[in-house]
Image (cartoon, rainbow, N blue to C red):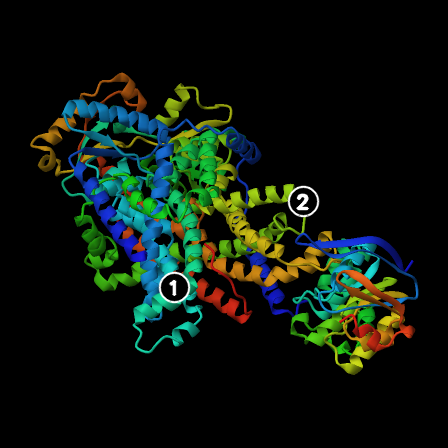
Amino acid sequence: MAGFDLSGLTASFGGERVIGPLSLKVKEGEQVALVGKSGAGKSTLMRLIHQHVNRNSSLVPQELGLVNALPVFHNVFMGRLDQHGNWYNTVTLMRPFSRDKDKVRELLKALGMAEKLWIPTASLSGGQRQRVAIARALYRSAPLLLADEPISALDGPMAHQVMQLLKDRFSASVFALHDVEMALAYCNRIVGIQDGQIALDEPAERLVASDIMSLY
Amino acid sequence: MFQSPTVRTSFIFLAIALVGLLFADIAITASNPWRDLGNFFFGVVTPNFFSNEGLMTALLRTVSFAFVGVALGSISGFLLALVYRWLPVRILCAFVRAIHELFWALIFLQFFGFHPLTGVLAIAIPYAGIFAKVYSEILEEADPEPGRLLPPRTGVISAFLYTKIPDCWVQLRTYTAYRLECGLRSSAILGFVGLPTLGFYLESAFSQGHYSDAGAMLILFYVLIATMPLWVKPKLLPVYILGAPFFLGEGLPIVWSNVGRFFTQDIVPSPLRGEEGWAGMGAWLGDMFVNQAMPGIWNTVILTQVALVATGIIALLAFPLISTHFGGPVRRTSGHVFLVIMRSTPEYILAYILLQLWGPSMLPAVVALALHNGGIIGHLIGRQSSSIRLRSDAPSGLSRYTYELVPRVYRSFLAFLFYRWEIIMRETAILGILGIYTLGFYVDSAIQNIQFDRAMMLILITASLNIGVDVLGRFIRRKLALQTMPTC
Amino acid sequence: MALNLMRKLMVSSLFCFGAASASAETFVFTAIPDEDETKLVERFRGVADYLSSELNVDVRYIPVKSYAAAVSAFRNNQVQLAWFGGLSGVQARRLVPGSEAIAQGVEDQAFETYFIANTSTGIEPADELASLEESLQGKTFTFGSKGSTSGRLMPEFYIRETFGEQPDEFFSRVGFSGNHTRTLRLVEAGTYEVGALNFQVWEKELADGNIDTDAVQVIWKTPAYPDYQWTIRGDVNERFGEGFKQRVTEALLNLDDQALLESFPRSGFIPASNDDYEPISKTAEEIGILD
């Protein structure tokens, strides 16, 4: 089951309601883009959705949450920690198994950074770190992707390559995107967020960029 | 993983400790250690607060010595910090802090005897050296910009008071308050060599197996330290510092001629005092080196390396106890209590207790050093780990520990560990007084045989060894680019 | 702030040390900490009261944590009288010219050290130490204090003389328990297999029923040697008046409070002289404790 159907979503911050109450239903095959100006509540909504679908998703949080001291391999491998026993994970920390190495290397190749497999994450650039977080989500390969600004630090061609990859690999996904063009190009449904409420919910083919700009 | 310099360094130290274990004297020689340990814990849970008339006085003396010693130490340390750039000052400070409080106390006992000055100086002198170093580091890190923007011809003192002090005040205050806690521990320990503080009664109670009395003293001591935030208030501080000198006790009057005798005769190497002169020095030094210094250094180094790694292991195991990423509030509170007890119990007292229970070997010393220092480091990195924000899909359990937390805190963990390396060695040497064959054993033996020349020489050797490890520790921290705040 | 603090501090510490030096004319004595402190404090407070009433001066006993601390306090003139062991007395009198041994216990003329062993070792008592060589070799062994005559000097002397080896070469592990009571408890508990202690402590604990004789027994007794004595500084007459030394000596020799004597335990005190301890001095030189 790739999609979800959530209702009554609310979130408050410092006693003030920042989200909802709202309902959101995503079906298999849908690529949803959450758009809206910063502070509208996209990230909060992302977190809410993740809480509800729990571990049944691949996550790319905005702050990435990488472990700087670990090499790229382990940061990617962390996407599947819950699928192995403790002993397996602990051994991998010391000496990774070759099938995991192959798999991770292949993913990194698709993201154009195969040579960085054993580099400590701390020494990577912002764009490279973002791709490591994306590789982790891909490696986890849950049916649902939740990605909060996954391409904010990537340059043009790479951003397109990554969006295409994510679109192909997940049967359902929710992106928080501030780049309206990207949202229209790679998603088939646009949800506009304004003051913590859904202000727009249309299939992408019915919209042009200027329709969305009113939200900003 | 092994390419990482921090990991490689860790494994090198682990390997050294494992080799050290082969040579270390690790054994439980007591025939019934668990019964004794049981008796001890029974004593702690059935404390007897009314056994000893002197207990409250001892507590008062402990606090007084700590206040006077730390106050004197911080004032002199501050003045030294102002001229810390000057190399002789740095060397002097490194030297005085490399000698443990107990060694200072043993030295002063020989000429001031049981006068309060002995205890006060035993704390104040090494603390001055430590304060000087830390204060100067804090002052150096102050933002230099405000100073540059002052009007020309502003006086040095005004500039210092207006630009440096306000910027560093909080840090200076925090560190001094923290040091006061260390001072309480040092003060308690001084009782073990005969000053009228808590250690005096603790030693008696323990050596006679009066565990309920000892338990009462330990509990009072923990309460004293745990409630420090309640009774050490900035406003009350002048009252304490003014009042403390009156509660040091009278002791016995100083006979000043003893001071001259100590420096002009007692510590002059015996060949120089006698007819042999310099000709006899070679033999004298050689004999001391072969029979005392070398075995002492060997045992001190081995014990230090084993204890260092054991400390690291304890710290890594203990920090999840207080980390917000594991367990509920109940588990965390008990974790806090456990770590507070571990770090408030001076290693000297822990080692003394364990030696009584398990019999003599390096084991009680290793365990004592590891528990105390591991408790301190565990507390620090546990607190640090709580400030880490994990992704909402972060793993739980062991994977959270190994993948998310340990890699993130490992560098500061190593930084603290290497910072404490020199402290562990200083303590290791002093534990010799309890009968473990480290340098302190030979110092104590020389003092027992009234050979202060030997004792002094061995103390100097101990100090040089500490300075050496301090330099090496700093080198490794710089090599690995590790940074840390000082701990005591 | 800091300056202000310092000024206050200096003023108050002057007060403190001024107050401390006021009580100089108290006659202070100490004793080597050879047994449990509680017992010592009880015993020597009794002695202090007795001396105070006999001498008409304030008399104070101060407990110390080590034999060396007792010697140092005596040497530094912070105490004027001390109850020393054979070795500590010799050390002290060498360091303080003019000081004298003035009284010893009746039993101290012929003191002994007992070697004791935990019964689990199976070592049987013997008349000659040499015949125990095989059974003692490689055992764990504890002395009392490092500065003790009966707990260290004499047993070490006999071990070296009989076995021709240093104690730490002959035994597998050598420790210093700190005092005689502690030695007894450690061997009784089996923490050490063998130990050496003051025979008076053993006899008194035995009489008081404090020894588990199934767990520990005496395996060898040393030949007799002179031990404990009261030693006084040579300059007490200048401080406390003409004839003070004589008065202290007489007070000690006349001590007949049975309970107090029992606590030592001694049947009474008899005159002593520095020369009585020449054998101790020689032994200490032989094993290198004294230069």
Quadrant hosting residue B408: bottom right
Give left or right: position of C122 versus C16.
right
* 1 and 2 marks on the same chain: yes
Say few, some or many: other residues with alpha carbon within 10 Å of mark 2 (under 14 / 14 to 19 / 20 or more). Answer: few
Viewer-proximal residue, C137 or B147?
B147
Query: Residue A163's spot in the image, x, y percent?
Result: 83, 74
Query: Residue C188's spot in the image, x, y percent?
Result: 48, 30
Give left or right: position of B411 versus A157.
left
Q: Which mark is residue B328?
A: 2
Query: Residue C224's spot in the image, x, y percent?
Result: 30, 30
Give left or right: position of A196 versus C167.
right
Q: On what subunit does the disc labeled 1 rest?
A: B
From the image, which quarter does the N terminus of chain C lie in?
bottom left
Of helix, strand and loop, which one carries label 2?
Answer: loop
Using the rendered image of the protein, determine whether residue C209 is visible from the camera's viewpoint. Answer: yes
Amino acid on which the number 2 mark rests in the picture: Gly
Quadrant hosting residue B470: bottom left
The answer to whether C17 is drawn above or below residue A167 in the figure is above
Looking at the image, tell me whether mark 1 or mark 2 is earlier in sequence order. 1
Viewer-proximal residue, B349 or B234?
B234
For marks 1 and 2, give the CA distance.
41 Å
Say few, some or many: other residues with alpha carbon within 10 Å of mark 1 (under 14 / 14 to 19 / 20 or more). Answer: some
Give left or right: position of C59 versus B348.
left
Of helix, strand and loop, which one carries label 1?
Answer: helix
The answer to whether B311 is drawn above or below residue C98 in the figure is below
> How many marks on residues?
2
Please name the residue that numbered disc 1 is placed on.
B165
- Residue shown at the point (39%, 57%) measured from the top left: B293
Q: On what subunit does the disc labeled 2 rest?
A: B
Amino acid on which the number 1 mark rests in the picture: Ile
Which of label 1 and label 2 is nearer to you?
1
Query: Residue B305's spot in the image, x, y percent?
Result: 52, 57
